[in-house]
Amino acid sequence: MKRFSLILTLLVTVACGKQADNVADDDNGSLPEQEIMSLELPAIPEAISTMEGKAGYLAGHFWDNLNFTDTLRSLNVDFMEQNFVDFLSLLPAVMSSDRAVAFDRMLKQASASHDAYWLMVDMGDKYLMDPNSPLRNEDYYIDFLNSVLGDTVISPVERERYEYFLREANKVRPGSPAPDFKYVTRAGKKSSLRQTLGKPLVLVFTAPQCDNCKGIIDFVSAHPSVAGPLESGEIQVLAIYPETDRNAWNKPLHKLPAAWIDAIVTQEGVDSLYPIPAYPAIYLINPNGTIRLKDATPEVLIEAL
């Protein structure tokens, strides 16, 4: 991200005792187009000396130079999305307590305009919750949801919706026990998640009519980080259909890899125990039955194995 490098440059420059301009005029005295789309960053007080402190201050005051009642900017989707991504790019360097404050301040400032506020909330959903977002981050999203629910501007219906999102986000967090469930394989063997443990388990929630699943499953199954340990017996892969519709399960669009355990649950409600925003949903479970990865991308799974 170009803006991310700009922010890092600013942090390093200020850390060295220099005050940098947020954007520089070109030879003609006009701003480059990409900088016109960026908010002017706040000046960091000299009393803040640590990088974490500087990043936290920038995140907490990132939106100070935007008048949210100026709808030419606050309702400009391209402008707002660019700056929202810039804001998110700061968060890896920010302490969790400062991150929560930054979300609180952001939404409080946005509440000056009803439409701008909801554009901001929609962007939070899009970038932090959407399974297809490269910036998806559940820790950030939980902080964001707590900020939304702390506002008085949302209606009872909206509050109920975001309380549901928060409950889903707080389910089966990494480090928590994986909820047990019973299943039966295509060969007719009955078992349960708990009985399958003992070595790292890749748990893949899939559906028989999921056309999108084939490409992802083929990629995961063929990768050496999965194929090698699976062949040597170091890991297991359980592909589970979380509904009890045997008729649908018996008509899959694609066959699963032969080395995977292909199964269907034998009890209702498993899809309420594990959030499944889209198929396939990939979890990694430790040998002791605790969640290591929740709804991970194939790339994150492969890196963890």
Image: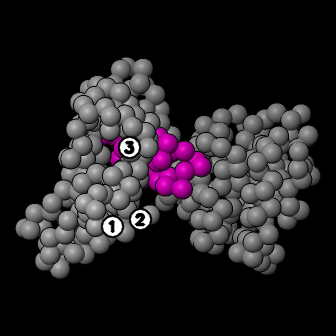
What residue is shown with label 1? 6
- Secondary element under disc 1, as helix, strand or loop, is helix
Residue occupying the far top of the picture? 156
Quarter of the picture holding the N terminus: bottom left
Q: Is residue 78 above or below residue 18?
A: above
- Distance (Cα) linking label 3 and label 2: 16 Å
Instruction: Please name whichever residue, 165 or 23, is drawn nearer the observer in this view of the structure.
Output: 23
- Distance (Cα) linking label 1 and label 3: 17 Å
Assess whether residue 252 is covered by the magenta stretch: no
Q: Residue at x 10, y 63 (%)?
A: 45
- Secondary element under disc 3, as helix, strand or loop, is helix
Whole-percent x and y of residue 170?
46, 45
Q: Are marks 1 and 2 in contact (CB under 8 Å)?
A: yes
Whole-percent x and y of residue 10?
25, 69
How crowded pointer 2 is (Cα within 10 Å; few <14, some 14-19, many 20+) is rated as few
Q: Residue at x 7, y 67 (%)?
A: 47
- Distance (Cα) linking label 1 and label 2: 6 Å
Residue segment shown in magenta: 124-150
Instruction: Please name whichever residue, 204 or 278, is drawn nearer the observer in this view of the structure.
Output: 278
How crowded pointer 3 is (Cα within 10 Å; few <14, some 14-19, many 20+) is rated as many
Q: Residue at x 62, y 58 (%)?
A: 297
The three-letter code of the residue at mark 3 reads Met
What residue is shown with label 3? 80
What residue is shown with label 2? 2
Sequence order check, earlier mark of 3 and 2? 2
Q: Is residue 22 above or below residue 153?
A: below
